[in-house]
Image (cartoon, rainbow, N blue to C red):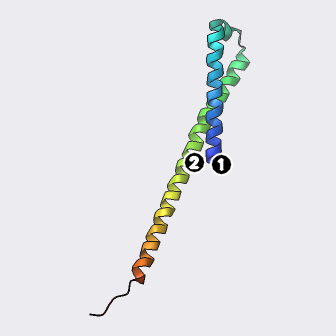
């Protein structure tokens, strides 16, 4: 879920940024003046939500990777301990 949420947040943020740049290059300041306050606030809210989503889902993905790495290290340590117990000691 973390990967999908992160990808969606980044895609929406990129799309909103591209839309804003295209709007600026086509109309410049006239397009900004023509945009209503409600539309501008909704774009701003969407951008803030995307940035928050990127931060949240990025953190979840980092935690997941960290947990997976710790589980892998524990599995390897348990496997090494089992192999150490299997070795037979030869009498001298």
Q: Position of residue 11 (x, y in %)?
A: 64, 33
The relative height of residue 65 versus residue 84 in the rendered view (above or below) is above
Q: Considering depth in this image, is 31 or 78 the residue closer to the camera?
A: 78
In the image, what residue occupies the spot 59% across and 43% down? 57
The residue that label 1 is drawn on is 1
In the image, what residue occupies the spot 53% across and 58% down? 68
SS label for mark 2:
helix
Q: Nearer the viewer, mark 1 or mark 2?
A: 1
Q: Position of residue 38 (x, y in %)?
A: 73, 19
Going from the N terminus, do you reach mark 1 or mark 2 first? 1
51 relative position to 71: left or right: right
Q: Residues within 10 Å of mark 1 (few under 14, many from 20)?
A: few
The relative height of residue 25 versus residue 10 in the rendered view (above or below) is above
The relative height of residue 6 versus residue 22 in the rendered view (above or below) is below
Q: What's the distance in space between the residues labelled 1 and 2, CA to CA?
A: 9 Å
* Quarter of the figure with residue 34: top right
Q: Considering depth in this image, is 88 or 77 the residue closer to the camera?
A: 88
């Amino acid at each position: 879920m973390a990967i999908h949420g992160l990808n969606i947040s980044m895609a929406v943020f990129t799309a909103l940024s591209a839309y804003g740049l295209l709007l600026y290059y086509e109309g410049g300041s006239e397009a900004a003046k023509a945009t209503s306050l409600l539309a501008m606030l909704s774009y701003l809210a969407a951008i803030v939500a995307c940035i928050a989503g990127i931060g949240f889902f990025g953190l979840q993905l980092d935690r997941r990777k960290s947990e997976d790495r710790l589980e892998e290290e524990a599995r390897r340590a348990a496997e090494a301990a089992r192999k150490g117990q299997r070795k037979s000691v030869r009498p001298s």
